[in-house]
Amino acid sequence: MRAVVAALALSAAIVFDAPLGAQSDVPVDFTIAFIGDQGLGANAQAVLTLIRNEGAAAVLHSGDFDYQDNPKAWDDQISAILGSDFPYFASVGNHDASMFRGPGGYQELLAARMQRLGIAWRGDLGVQSSFRYRGIFFVLTAPGVFGSGDGLYDLFIANELAADSSTWRISSWHKDMQLMQVGGKGDETGWGVYEQSRRGGAIIATTLVLSRDDPSTPADEGRSFVFVSGLGGKSIRDQQLSGPWWASIYTSTQGATYGALFGVFDYRGDPGLAHFYFKDIGGRVADEFFVRSAAVEQPPPCTTAACDCRGRPDAAPCDDGDACTASDACVAGVCRGGTPRGCDDGDACSIDTCSPGGGCVHRPIVLADLRSGLRRGLRAGACRGQPVPRSVARILGRARSLLVRADATSSSARAGRFITRALRVLSHGRAALTSAQRRVSPSCAATLRQRFDDAQTGLSCLLQGP
């Protein structure tokens, strides 16, 4: 339904209230993936695979599941990648309403999953419900989907949060108010659900976009925040609205692709700190931010180099223990890595990498490096989905095949001849590359040129020998 995610700006820190005497038994680095608007198929599966690979311990899905009214197919897709007993929580979306309740419906499958995990809940699961899992309290409601937000769900949220004393509390629903998204939707939930969630010290999770809260309540600013994660695999929309209150926006206008927002609670053993980051299926981290709970007064003793910022101001220099970052600085009591350390040794015939534990590493280029680079030529992020001419693909394929033959032979002389032929193929392919530049975006054209240049340089290095 929406294709945007917004989080607080890079390295931003939020302090929000939770109830006095709050309790926390959240495991260290407990990670939850937040998604919405999922669908069935390759894109949704790629997001679920990302969630698995990031080591998430649970998913919170804020509505709009498969868009096909097929609860079994949706549940099977989740189980095939994450497992049938993976903690998967969800609040109902408008595209799920007709098949949510009843035998074989989404609610029945969600309830069965929670029962297998031994998780008890109160109320109408996914509609007007609450539960506690691994020290985090969840309130799942359906304003604008099954009834009005004001006078119904806002009262439920207020009562549930008032009865709970968890440090971390999350209030999730699907629809939004107009000021809480950058698409073309109007007011659909009422402000009450936002206000009661904030007053109860809950993080607000929906599937549209981060915005400000109700502008008529300035006294409540800073009590909570809203995030949105709606790039679960179905669609990617453009940005239509804007305003000075947006912290970060990630839509098709910004070149977005599918992904998930990850929240890491009890970050590095600090029960009052959470680290959030949005990562897409291409590996890009579009934004990240920290949240500190005001309910936790004293963090645990510092035992690693990465926590040497406790009690120090933001921007104070520190060492995050990673040899691949420079200009590390304190943010919200945590040492954050700065700019990537440059490892370029100026030698075009070497591969320069960085090891977090040891720093820069330099080694001579080998055939496998060039074969890998040619294989990625048309799958590079800047060219993904663009009609790159077949002539370019054929050139890269022919060069790669020659390198495979060079790698397979035991004769250095024959290997040299195959490498020379591959170099000649790439040189003659410049005409096709020039033609391709007129049919792809400038960024894709630049990527293709770089692939050719890197391959030709590397082949020349191999011919020169050590």
Image: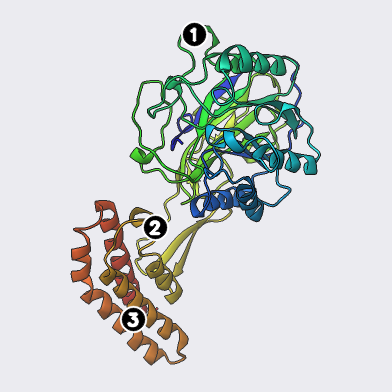
Residue 154's spot in the image, x, y percent? 61, 15
Which residue is nearer to you in this view: 334 or 374? Answer: 374
253 lies above or below 382: above
Q: Residue 291 at x, y = what percent? A: 58, 27
Label 2 SS: loop
Q: Earlier in the sequence, mark 1 or mark 2?
A: 1
C-alpha span from label 3 to label 2: 22 Å
In this view of the protein, which residue sits in the foreground, 156 or 402? 156
Q: Which residue is mark 2?
A: 344
Report the disc number at residue 236. Answer: none
Q: Are marks 1 and 3 in contact (CB under 8 Å)?
A: no
Q: Quadrant of residue 27?
A: top right
Mark-to-mark CA distance, 1 and 3 = 68 Å
Q: Which residue is mark 3?
A: 463
**Which badge, 3 or 2, comes first in the chain's sequence?**
2
Residue under the point 53% across and 25% down: 226
Nearer to me, 411 or 328: 411
At label 3, which amino acid type do we have?
Leu
| Dot 2 amino acid type | Asp
Label ID, residue 218: 1
What kind of residue is marked 1?
Pro
The residue located at (33%, 88%) in the rendering is 417
Residue 313 lies left or right of residue 366; in this view the side is right
